[in-house]
Structures are given as structure tokens and as C-alpha cells.
Amino acid sequence: MPSPSTAGPSTTGPSTVRRVLTRAAVMRLIIGWAAVGALALAGPLLTPPVSVPLLIGALVAIIAVILLCAFGVVHEAEALAHRLGDPYGTLTLTLSIVTIEVVLIAAVMLGPGDHTTIARDSVMAVSMIILNLIAGVCLLVGGLRHGDLRANRTGALAYTTLLVVLSATAFALPAMIGADGAYTPAQAVPVIAMTLGLYGFFLWRQMGAQAADFQEVTGPAGEEAAHRATTVGSESESATASESATASETDTVPDVDHSPSIREIIAEHRPEVLARTALLVATVLPIVLLSHDMATLLDDGLGRVGAPVALAGVLIAMIVFTPESITAVRAALGGEMQRVVNLCHGALVSTVGLTIPTVLVIGLLTEQHVVFAETPANLLLLGTTLALTAVTAASPRVTAMHGAAHLMLFALYALALFS
């Protein structure tokens, strides 16, 4: 990703609006809000039970519009990522996608029918899709093109550390201390507080003292130098770390000392940042408004064909993460391994760290029984996935073989889903 300092001069006024509000962006807004209006007018016609042709047509149309708007959200988030630089830019992208997922899950929970496991199924599907399918494809295509890839191991393992704790909290602990696979209200409150506290502390460190741990670093020498440059306080030691990083022709390290701060970047490009943020919000809103109708029709359709209950969560995960998956694959083809890690692992940390508290709050407010405890088969697959993710993150050289192993785990998850 280009450095924010070289992204170009700041512009203000109408030129910024014209550059941000492109023809494609305007078309996405028109189509998204037109779909919202059309569904509002056709509300009585889409109240279940709905005829099969109308059900299929409406679902296809709604999902297509949601995907179109999701691609728009990702486009604006990527533009912000380019302007702000990592880790702030990638964080903006992942939070935008996670917001959409949380909205879709909440819409299903608050809609008709019994959806006690929709949050568990969705987050589990997201975990398997991101850590095995998307990461597997990225490692496979990136390894085949570049031979081997290198990520910043400190940052990659930081993600894995949080995923182990958050996954155990979400999927394993409720079966042991909860009631019928769900946390009791007295347990849910501290779990919400601790989850948000850990996630907030992670964001604080990621955007502050440990920001360099989540930037592109190639080679073990460069990674060690980046870590020393961000953790050692004295100027002489920082200079030594910089010299050791440039001593090798194959190792590169982020220029922490000379990169502009996030405040400087926002101050210099405030009109563009504000315009893109406003456009991002305006593109997200149709997804929020369409999600309720999609959830109602999806529940009706899956019930008619007798599909597995967990399939709804898989479909939500696939709808939400399709745009980001394409972004991650592009990064892998470009050899940007740390960007792949930031997109995949960062998205999952945000998903678990935000979805679990949100769903527990909804459960407390609506007095719903929210089941999080996973089946033994899924717990085995998740544990194996996290172990393989840790091994991959700690490897000095990541190859296509790692990707093939992740893809096999996703195939095993699909087999278990329909068993």
C-alpha cells in the first residue's frame, strides 16, 4: 500500500466532491435507496407465506443490491485505507464490513421465527470462511506466484492470541458454565464488559504503540528491527534498529520515525476523509434497511427446503465478506502478506469482539435465549483451525502448502455442516 505521505496533495471544495462522488458511487446510491423504496411499497406482497417465484426473485434482487452496496462500502473504505495507511486504513475497511454483518445478524434475531443459534452459526461460519477459505486461497495463490510470503509475525500472532481467547469465550465456555448452551444474564454482563474491554485495548495498542507490528515487514531481520524501533525509547537504539533494517537488501521495515501521524494525515486531507466517510455511511444505510426483509424471506425459504439451520449463518457470512475476500486475494497476488493478515485476521477479531457483545445485549433486552455453545465437531474444527493459524503466523516462510492445509479444513467444515 502506498505511503499516505505520497498519496498526493490535499484538495478542497467541489473538486473533492466530484472525485469522491463518482458516477459508479451515485449509481450505487440510487439503486440502493430505490430498492429500499420499492420494498417499502411492496411490503404486504412480501409477507410470508410468499409464492415460490416471488420469494426467489425478491431474495435474488435483495441480495444483489446488498452485494452492490457492500462493494461500494469496500471501495470507499479502501480509498480511506489508501489515504490513512495501515493499520488505520485496514481497520476502517474491516470495521465497515463487520458493521454490515452485525446488522444482518441483528435483523435475523429481531425478525420472525426462532433464531437462538443464528449468531453462533454466523460467527462460526465467518471464522471458517476467513481463516480457512479466504486465507487458504490467499496463501495458495500468493505462494504459487511469489514462492513464499512473509508477514509481520508479531502482529499476526497478536491477532491469533485474541482469537483464541475470544473463541473460547464465545463457543466453549457457555456449554460449561451457562444454561442450555447460553450465558445466564448474570454471566452475560461481565462477558460483554470483558470482551469489549479486551477488544478496545487491542485497538488502542494497534493504533498506538504497536502500530508498526501491523505494517508490511519482509524478512525476520526487518521484523525484529521494526519491533525494536517501536519499543525502545532512546534515540540511539532506534537509530541502531534502523541501520540493522537497511543493512540487508531483502529486508524492508516501515519508516516509523518519518511517517506522518494520523492526525497530520486527517488534517491535511480532511475534506476527502469527511466526504468519503459520509458516502460510506450513505451506502451502508440501504444494507441496514434491506437486511430485515432479506432475513424474513431467507428464513421462509430455508424453512421450506428443510436446509440446515446453520446454513443461514453461512449465507450471511458469504454475502458480507465477498467484497473483502476479493480485496484480500488481490493483496496476496501483490505479495502484501501483512495486508492479507490485517484483512482476514483483523476482520475476524472485530467480528467476534463486536458481534458477541451486541448479540448478548440484544438477548438481554429482548429476553431471548441466545445459544453460543458449539457442537463437538465444530469445536474440534475451530481448535484445529486456530492451531494451524498460529503455526502459519509463526512460520518464517509461508508457502502454498499452508494454504492447501487451510482449504482442506474448510472442506471438512462444509462436510460437517451437511452431516
Image (cartoon, rainbow, N blue to C red):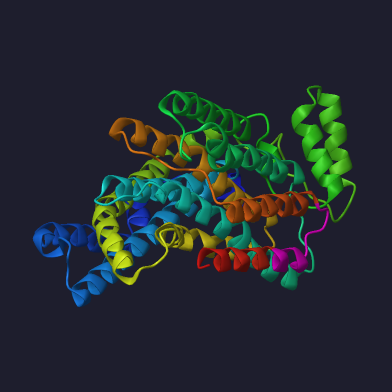
Residue 355 placement: quadrant: top left
Residue located at (52% from left, 52% from top): 124
Residue found at the far bottom of this picture: 53
Residue 361 placement: quadrant: top left
- Residue 80 visible: no
Nearer to us in this view, 210 or 251:
210
Total numbered labels:
0
Relative horizontal placement of residue 161, taking residue 52 as reference (left or right): right
- Residue 410 visible: yes
> Where does the image place residue 212, in percent across and percent down from the top left?
69, 39
Residue found at the far front of this picture: 180
What is the quadrant of the N terminus in the image?
bottom right
Residue 18 placement: quadrant: bottom left
What residue span does the magenta drawing correspond to? 395-405
> Where does the image place residue 253, in percent across and percent down from the top left?
77, 45
Nearer to us in this view, 228 or 318:
318
Nearer to us in this view, 97 or 417:
417
Q: Is residue 259 magenta?
A: no
Picture layout, residue 67 above or below residue 79: below
> Where does the image place residue 388, in percent across and percent down from the top left?
73, 54
Picture layout, residue 21 above or below residue 273: below
Picture layout, residue 1 above or below residue 311: above
Residue located at (17% from left, 65% from top): 49
> Where does the image place residue 186, in percent across and percent down from the top left?
44, 23
Nearer to us in this view, 368 or 387:
368
